[in-house]
Amino acid sequence: MGEFQSVARTGDIPEGEGRAFAVSGRMVAVFLRDGQYHAINDSCPHMGASLATGWVEDDQVTCPWHAWRFCITDGSWLDNPQSDLNTDCYEVRVVENEIQVLVPERQDPGTDAAAGDE
Ligand code: FES
């Protein structure tokens, strides 16, 4: 399920920029745009560049390595909307002056496997 975790204070992320934070064993990119915070997986699905260091314009971030573009509000891959490729998107809230991100706990890929089939 996961729970909200504080990653920064308001004011730590400049308007129109992103910052990367470690949350529950993964890196999360948090962006501030038009006074709203958005969070997606920081690792670009192409080759792993930090999306937090990309160029933010409107609701999109452009990866700094090969310029793939992702939506910072839902993680979709904007260069090919027909594709299922996207990056995870996380819920963000501000409590007092703390920016908090909700990242689900990682699932152990082996836990759902049926046992005793031999
Ligand atoms: S690593 Fe992001 S586009 Fe290549």
Image: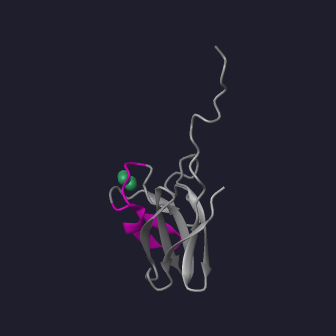
The residue lying toward the viewer, choosing from 93 and 64, is 93
Residue at the front extreme? 116
The residue lying toward the viewer, choosing from 25 and 37, is 25
Q: Is residue 54 visible?
A: no
| Total number of numbered discs in the rendering | 0
51 vs 75, left or right, is left
Magenta-colored stretch includes residue 38: no
* Quarter containing the N terminus: bottom right
Q: Position of residue 14 (x, y in %)?
A: 43, 82
In this rendering, is residue 104 above or below 112?
below
What residue do we see at 58% from left, 48% from top? 82
In this rendering, is residue 108 above or below 14?
above
Residue at the top extreme? 118
87 vs 4, left or right, is left
Q: Please state the extent of the stretch shown in magenta in the rendering.
A: 46-64
Q: Position of residue 90 (x, y in %)?
A: 59, 63
Q: Is residue 105 visible?
A: yes
* Quarter containing the C terminus: top right
Q: Position of residue 100 (x, y in %)?
A: 57, 73
Image quadrant where residue 52 sits = bottom left
Tell me how the rendering is colored.
Answer: one colour
The residue lying toward the viewer, choosing from 72 and 58, is 72
What residue do we see at 46% from left, 73% from top? 57
Residue at the left extreme? 65
Magenta-colored stretch includes residue 50: yes
What residue do we see at 37% from left, 67% from top? 53
In this rendering, is residue 15 above or below 66?
below
Q: Position of residue 4 (x, y in %)?
A: 61, 68
